Amino acid sequence: MITAEWKPMDELVASLKKGYRRVLLLGCATCVAECATGGEREVNTLAPLLKMALAKEGQETEIIGRTLERQCEPEFVAEVAELAGQVDAIMSLACGIGMQLVAETFPEVPFHPGVNTTSLAIREEPGLWTARCAACGDCVLGETFGLCPVARCAKSLMNGPCGGTRPDGSCEVDPDTPCIWYLIVERAKARGALDSLADVRPAKDWSNSRHGGPKRMLKEELRP
Ligand code: SF4
Ligand code: SF4
């Protein structure tokens, strides 16, 4: 799932303090609802908070809350087309993908992000999400025993630990995060395959990651 967090309230208020009289606060019932950031409940929580904060700043603004099934699908975004034409601005609580689809669909309406999109993650335990993938475009999980060094090493090291791993196996950058190379080595040992980590491999292909420019995926068989 994609995780996101509310932007600081000061930043949200500053972005809406532009004389707007009606603002559409748009949630998404999928990933950002799962991580308790942008679902219907969070829209209903944030709307009155924004209204009050703006009133304190001397701006009376109606905050209209709506939550779409998915903000990253045009069919669902179309559901608020009429409403989008009746507001002065839209603030979205979806991930960066959903936000951009909304901004693209209604280019004439001022758009403001309500969240920062943070990771592709799993819910490791209640209230804790941890990154698992960085969509690098050339997956190496087959070589690293199913553990991702791109997303889970603070330095995205591809050839083993940096040397800063703490004695308890945590990362030198964050003691609350396991060193992923420590975990890779432990898993390799458990499988009796430690030697495989010494194999010389071709350099990872980064051309299909963000460094190679914007990605696109084309499947001719699905095109009309
Ligand atoms: S290697 Fe790349 S595609 Fe595979 S899990 Fe890690 S970031 Fe994601
Ligand atoms: S301690 Fe481990 S996870 Fe942290 S930066 Fe070094 S190799 Fe990466």
Image (cartoon, rainbow, N blue to C red):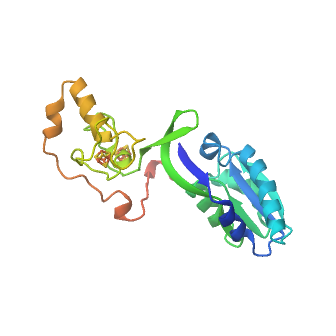
Seen at 65% across and 61% down, the residue is 102
Outermost residue toward the front in this view: 167
Residue 85, percent from left and from top? 79, 67
The reply, left or right, for residue 82 in relation to residue 195 is right
Residue 175, percent from left and from top? 39, 43
Seen at 24% across and 24% down, the residue is 190
Residue 185 in the image: above or below residue 133: above
Is any atom of residue 82 visible in this view?
A: no
Residue 168, percent from left and from top? 32, 35
Q: Nearer the viewer, residue 18 or 108?
A: 18
Outermost residue toward the bottom in this view: 19
The reply, left or right, for residue 213 in relation to residue 10 is left
The reply, left or right, for residue 177 in relation to residue 29 is left
Seen at 41% across and 45% down, the residue is 133
Residue 188 in the image: above or below residue 46: above
Seen at 76% across and 49% down, the residue is 45
In the rendered picture of this protein, how many numbered marks are placed on residues? 0
Residue 61, percent from left and from top? 84, 66
Is any atom of residue 67 visible in this view?
A: yes
